[in-house]
Amino acid sequence: MPLNDERLTSTSSGEDQGSDVDSSSDRCDSMTLTSDLDCSRESFTSDSSSKHCTPSSSPPKTITLDEVMDTAKDLFNLSISHEITVNPSFHVDRDSLRQDGLLKVVRDNLHKAFWDILEAELNNDPPEYEQAIRLLGEIREILLSFLNPGANRMRTQIMEVLDMDLIRQQVDNDAVDIKGLASYIITTMGKMCAPVRDEEIKKLKESPENIVTLFREIFRVLDLMKADMVNHSIKSLKPVLACHGVEYERARFQSILDAVPNSLDRTTSWMKSVLEELLSAAVPQEQKGQPPVPGPFQILNAAFLRILTWDYNKNLLPETLVTDETRLQEIQWQLQRSQAVNEVLLIIFSTIGGPIEGLPSLSDRLKKMISVLLDGMHRPDFNLEKSLEGVSAQICCELNKSLTERDYPALSPALQTTLTGQICSITQKDNPIRTLVEDRVQQYFKALICDPKPRVKLEQVPAGLAAVKPELAMLGAKFISLVNYNKAVYGPFYADIIRKLMFSSSPAAGRPPQDTAQDSVVSN
């Protein structure tokens, strides 16, 4: 039978990404988030907390095949519900495989073999209808799947017209009307399809006499109708998930945790490394003779801040962040490019100085030029140093043009060489301009993560980052939206992990952690 080629796709503009997370948090999750983190706070200082706030972890055990399948289903449902919640443009689309992909070759060959067999059978004398009957049976099941529970009349009609036993009897008596059945199928599809498919149905009615070609087109339109139905269901689910997505995702994750041992190993390692880093960086308190213990929210916020510089080539993301891996990587890539653009602009204006100060149009042109030339700098095959040499050459040309237009002398060869060298030096990790920009970007995101109302601080970028303020604000909104939703879903799991780590660590074992004012509940 023809293969049903569908895929889940998510396309959205930068502005829209994560907007559903904000709106759902604002509408339905603020009470839930506060409650969950309050319960989490209690769990840091007590061995018991309310039942619904304390996640349970299972001891190691042997997993059966059925449990593996159930876990895979839970993981799929978790991923889909999360995607529907955080991606406003999430939808189902028919699979468009790469033209040179092996899977496409296999699929096309299988399809061709099926349709060739069908055509050969129908062209026999007398015709054979075995493949055609199977085809009609599959079409009947697809049509029935489109019906609402109360559509009994149409269900009965479809079962009567596409009665496989009756059709087989007609075949045996050489009385089957394949074209008449195809006409009924097309008419029924026209009654069920969305208005957007009316033109496709019209084309089916005008299709050529070749019955094989007609059935191929019928299946193509049925695939479109299936995608329409799923997208309608997704649209209907969005309001429900907006209010109950947090609880649903947490329940699905708990099911995975119950079934699969060590499901939070990477998350625990992530939190442990952050705690150790904070403890080692703490300044000793002379009066107490021991360093101050970081609070649980301080640990959690520092952990999320680390995700911005996560090395995806060396380490897998924590289990609680895998559903947002693509989004987090995209934020990191865009942030790296924005930092590089800002570093180059700082070098330009500090090196050239007065003749180009106070020229916003020039600054904008240089920014766009640098951004375009550094596009894709996250790719492994991207040669940053060579690209920066090209950036420097383009910048020198643009500066010379601007200077001569305003009766200033062009840049001397020595100054151009100096400028190029300074720009290319940002590839070095200890470059002072690079260090300055990266530190201030970290300050900016730390302020967003730690503030209960981060939207107020989106436009408050540190000094020296004004050139990329719009980009930072956009990336900050995306990142904080994902972080706050993640905290809402996995807050109890984080609380349980951090509590165990803190009460088992030395020298603070047995001593309750103290939260600072900035470690208050973070919610959008």
Image (spheres, rainbow, N blue to C red):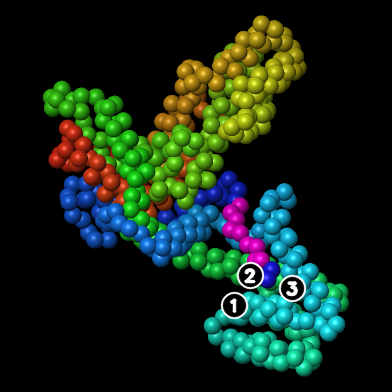
**Secondary-structure class at tag 1:** helix
Q: Position of residue 483 (x, y in %)?
A: 42, 46
Residue drawn at (51%, 50%), measured in percent from left and top?
Answer: 18
Q: Quadrant of residue 140?
A: bottom right
Residue drawn at (26%, 49%), measured in percent from left and top?
Answer: 496
- The three-letter code of the residue at mark 3 reads Ile
Q: Nearer the viewer, residue 180 or 23?
A: 180
**Residue 411, above or below 456:** above
In the picture of the structure, the residue carrying the numbered disc 3 is 218
In the picture of the structure, the residue carrying the numbered disc 2 is 226
Q: Position of residue 433 (x, y in %)?
A: 50, 19
- The three-letter code of the residue at mark 2 reads Lys
- The three-letter code of the residue at mark 1 reads Ser
Res. 157 visible in picture: no
Circles 2 and 1 in contact, beta carbons < 8 Å: yes
Q: Which residues are magenta?
A: 3-11
**Secondary-structure class at tag 2:** helix
Q: Which mark is residue 145?
A: 1
Tag 1 or tag 2, which sits nearer the N-term? Answer: 1
Q: Position of residue 305 (x, y in %)?
A: 40, 37
Estimate the spatial distance between the alpha carbons at disc 2 and disc 1, rounded to whole Å: 9 Å
Answer with left or right where residue 80 lies relative to residue 358: left
Q: Nearer the viewer, residue 371 or 159?
A: 159
Tag 1 or tag 3, which sits nearer the N-term? Answer: 1
Q: Nearer the viewer, residue 292 or 276?
A: 276
Is residue 322 within the magenta segment?
no
Q: Position of residue 415 (x, y in %)?
A: 65, 8
Residue drawn at (69%, 57%), measured in percent from left and top?
Answer: 106
Answer with left or right where residue 362 lies relative to residue 18: right
Tag 2 or tag 3, which sits nearer the N-term? Answer: 3
Estimate the spatial distance between the alpha carbons at disc 3 and disc 2, rounded to whole Å: 12 Å
